[in-house]
Image (cartoon, rainbow, N blue to C red):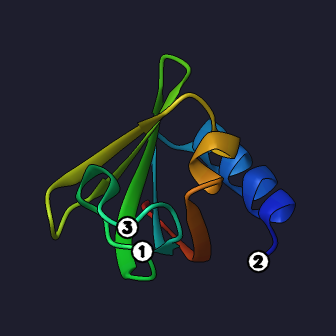
Amino acid sequence: MNREKAREFLEKELRKRPTVKASAIFTGKHGSMGFHAGRFYAVTIVKRRGEVVLIAPDDGLKCPYSSINAMLNNWHILLVIFER
């Protein structure tokens, strides 16, 4: 999924529900906020008060971002799985 389609898709889904579960690869700086570059994570994306928070429940790691674009700078979203 390219970045623009991922951004549009996530924005649309976050308007419909408070959380979106996704499969993603961390592409940011290795060790940033405890994440490791190139590692696959199952994450939960939450948007609240204009901030996007990405949570990796398995590792208990959190990453706050100012926007979905800022989040996508550090992540490659592979597959979105909806929480109903």
- Vertical placement of residue 57 versus 8, above or below: below
At a point 53% along the width and 69% down the height, the residue shown is 27
Residue hosting label 1 = 37
Give the mark nearer the N terminus: 1 vs 2: 2
Residues packed near mark 3 inside 10 Å, few (<14), some (14 to 19) or many (20 plus): few
Along the viewing direction, whichever of 80 and 4 lies nearer the viewer? 4
Ranked by sequence position, the earlier of labels 3 and 2 is 2
SS class, disc 2: loop
| Mark 2 burial class by Cα count in 10 Å: few <14, some 14-19, many 20+ | few
Residue 43 position within the rendered picture, expressed as x and y whole percent measured from the top left:
37, 64
Q: Position of residue 73 (x, y in %)?
A: 64, 53
Amino acid residing under circle 2? Met
Q: Quadrant of residue 42?
A: bottom left
Give the x, y percent position of residue 9.
Answer: 74, 57
Residue furthest out toward the top: 49
Task: Identify whether 40 is placed above or below 74.
Answer: below
Contact (CB < 8 A) between labels 1 and 2? no
Q: Is residue 30 above or below residue 55?
A: below
Question: Label 1 to label 2, Cα distance in Å?
Answer: 19 Å
Circles 1 and 3: CB atoms closer than 8 Å: yes
Foreground label between 3 and 2: 3
For the residues bearing labels 3 and 2, Cβ distance under 8 angstroms: no
Q: Can you identify the residue that label 2 sits on? A: 1
> Which amino acid type corresponds to the residue marked 3 in the rendered image?
His
Residue type at mark 1 is Ala
**Residue name at image x 28 percent, y 50 percent:** 33
Going from N to C along the chain, the mark reached first, 1 or 3, is 3
Q: CA distance from mark 3 to mark 2?
A: 22 Å
* 82 sits left or right of 2 in the view: left
The image quadrant where one finds the N terminus is bottom right
Identify the disc placed on residue 30. 3
